[in-house]
Amino acid sequence: MAVVDVSEELKSLTSTLESIGAVLDLDKLRADIAVLEAQAASPSLWDDVENAQQVTSRLALLQGQVRKVEELRSRIDDLEVMFELAESENDADTRGEAEAELQSIKKSMGALEVRTLLSGPYDVREAMVSIRAEAGGVDAADFAEQLQRMYLRWAERKGYPTEVLDTSYAEEAGIKSTTFTVKTPYAYGTLSVEQGTHRMVRISPFDNQGRRQTSFAGVEVLPVVEQTDHIDIPENELRIDVFRSSGPGGQSVNTTDSAVRMTHIPTGIVVSCQNEKSQIQNRAAAMRVMQSRLLAHKRAQEQAKMDALKGDGGNSWGNQMRSYVLQPYQMVKDLRTDHEVGNPQGVLDGDIDDFLEAGIRWRMQQEK
């Protein structure tokens, strides 16, 4: 890389970082942080646990956003010094380190830039992800389980806590459905682009004749409900059934009627939870899922009204959204963004950041 190229690269990075800082409004963030720090220092903060958790969570989020911008600015300054040192001493090793750091900064900058695109009313929320096996029999159930592992591994790599609320196991292999939460700010905004139908093509490990099989699994992503959402559900609108859990678990899980199925009578929405040992815990988890689904139902109704007024017929951004091809060639391709890679196993092991970034950028273009 020529010296002039390095100079232009550094100018471009600095300009992009300034644009990101302007979008985030760093002065306002710092003012908000000062207010939250004062609240967090109050001796009476934990008298109201829910409010305390909101204050500390919001404070950590804003501090993290400012810190990322400041760290990138410092790294760009250090990078300029590294290139100057490599040039003055004609040091190939130092130059190699500087070029590697340049690529790392670009990647970090891209991720931060994408974060600024998550400005929807619920994007900052934690995410509730549901996966269900669709067409394809036992292969679809196995594929659904692979998708569950993919998202959980992605979260694990990032250090994001997760909680599996419900898993319904298929008879032969895999799962019929699962619901879990990803507990980190902006999980919903990030993962919402994964919603839709996923398709896998491979030689079926369950077919004695070794034939190629196409299977499908559906992914739904909802924002986790917060206290401010006011999702009140009258008891007479709910039907609650208890049943015995199925699948892996300890003795108390499989031999008592601890699983809960909850039906919202007016909408017909049904959720179930069976991963906890007690009926009370499963009922509480089912209620959280139900509230998120009713929030999404309310949003869908409001969006339909807006779409009708705009006359666009409800502009949905696609149902079948990604193909995972393991046979006769190796490829994962997003059908909306055309982003593709030739390493399906890496993707299924949680390496989905590039797909998420491409999806977020694509969605922003669709909304313009």
Image (cartoon, grey):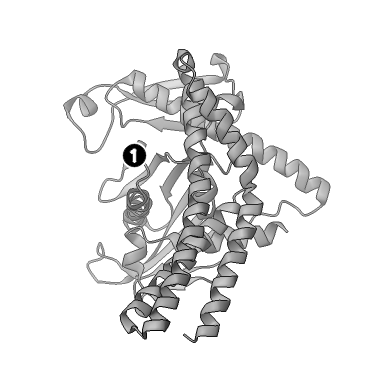
- Is 61 placed above or below 324 here? above
Toward the viewer: 341 or 14?
14
Q: In front here: 170 or 68?
A: 68
Q: Is residue 226 left or right of residue 311?
A: left
Measured from the top left, where is residue 285 in percent x and y?
41, 27
Which residue is painted at 58% across and 16% down in the image? 234
Is label 1 in a helix, a strand or a loop?
A: strand
- Looking at the rendered image, the quarter that the C terminus falls into is bottom right
- Considering only vertical position in the picture, is 341 above or below 42? below
Camera-side residue: 163 or 187? 187
Residue placed most toward the observer, 175 or 66: 66
Q: Quadrant of residue 211?
A: bottom left
The type of residue carrying mark 1 is Thr
| Residue for point 18% across, 30% down | 250
Residue 336 appears anywhere in the view: no
Label 1 CA crowd tier, 10 Å (few <14, some 14–19, many 20+)? many
Image coordinates for residue 184, horizontal then vertical, percent: 44, 41
Place residue 249 in its image quadrant: top left
Q: Is 206 drawn above or below residue 293 in the view shown? A: below
Identity of the residue drawn at 45% across and 32% down: 271
Tell whether 347 sits left or right of 265.
Answer: left
Q: Identify whether 326 is placed above or below 273.
A: below
Label 1 sits on residue:
167
Give left or right: position of 307 versus 281: right
